[in-house]
Amino acid sequence: MGFEGDDRAPNTVDRHYLSEKISVARWKPEGVDGWSERIVTGSWDQPANGNGISLWWYRPPLHTDLPVLDDRVPVADGDVTDIKFVDGENFLYSTSDGSVYMYKLGWRGGASDGGPGGRMQLEEKCCWERLHEGAGGSTCACNRIDTSPDTTDIVTCGQDGRLALLSTTRPGVVQAALDTHDTTSVQAVCFVRHNEIVAGDLRGIIKVWDVRSGDAGGPAGMFPFSRDCVVGVSSLVVLPAQRHILVGGGHNGSLSVWDLRHSASPLLVYNAHELSITDIGFHHTRPSNLFTASETGEIWQWADFDRSVRTALAPRSDESDSTLAGGYDAVTRPPEVQSLLGVKNFPTNSVDANKERLLGSSDSESIVIIHPLVLK
């Protein structure tokens, strides 16, 4: 069920123009059963007015109205490259000058509850400046950020080929730096467990790190995104209920799945979008639904995605060995794929789901909200 009065057809697309290129947009988390009413967006490539982080109020069924701007703060240098909520009040964002900032959402006037339609504001808590730098101190982008599922740890990856480990409890302090020992830009990173990180680079190499050992000895393991050709990694995410299952998007538009316990070969490979996958996200409370965004402008929903993974994990019944590592069978029922947004003239840069609504950001100076979703 959606909001009362929401009688629209399934997967209706509302596009809201915000007058700046939106690199990333995220819903404010509201717990398992909560409908989010706030959206945080980050912009890029705005030389005239400068880039910023914006907080919007959005509440259906007022579908025809633009989201209401609660607050906006300028970004000191560079573009916004990623946004990650730590909890329902605090979020991180990264920039193309290699920095990471943490902000809190607070009610104007200091009230603990703004009431219906109350305005919120953005409050800076701390920053980690110039985490990623090139030769001679040149600027390098911080491409992605992720947070540990069990601890206060943060990991960032950069254009300089390095990872940085931070903590929300130690503002401004770099706990550790992991060097990939080459200068290939690391495009994607995520926590598998509190002590294990995976990162993928532009050359298509995925590396697994044990953070307990730090940089000593290098990565604990590595494998290519594709064994047929060089495919740069654009996005990485783990299956929430089975965190040893890694899902990766490639710059060629393909989607691959690995069991990190047997990562020599992928479990599944799908030829998906025609251009690079820009973002991947599971639904937070219905993780059988996966969403992908692409440079083609498309947004796809992959329903029953976990079912396909479970089938691929099942041992083969007709022979004792398999050509795939771990004795798994890659001949599975494919997930149900539906295009929620078709090919456009501008890329879709991010996707994020909240209950029966999907949020996307675009270079068309807009966000899209697709609702009500049909979820498996």
Image: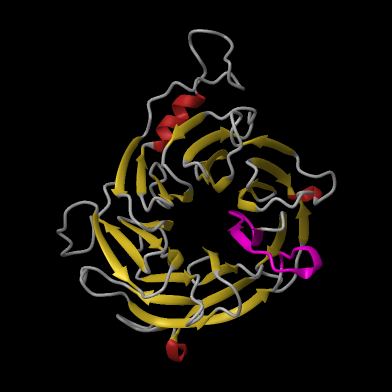
| Residue 153 on image: x %, y % | 66, 60
Q: Which segment did they paint magenta?
A: 131-157
Viewer-nearest residue: 125 or 232: 232
Colouring used for the render: secondary structure
Residue 75 visible? The answer is yes
Is 142 included in the stretch rendered in magenta?
Answer: yes
Name the residue: 58% across, 16% down. Answer: 323
Classify the position of the C terminus by image quarter: top left
345 left or right of 313 in image: left
Name the residue: 16% across, 53% down. Answer: 9
347 left or right of 87 in image: left
Q: Is residue 83 above or below residue 117?
A: above
| Residue 3 on image: x %, y % | 23, 63
Viewer-nearest residue: 229 or 369: 229
Q: Is residue 2 above or below residue 61?
A: above
Is 339 included in the stretch rendered in magenta?
Answer: no
Q: Is residue 328 above or below residue 371?
A: above
Name the residue: 59% across, 28% down. Answer: 228
| Residue 266 on image: x %, y % | 56, 30
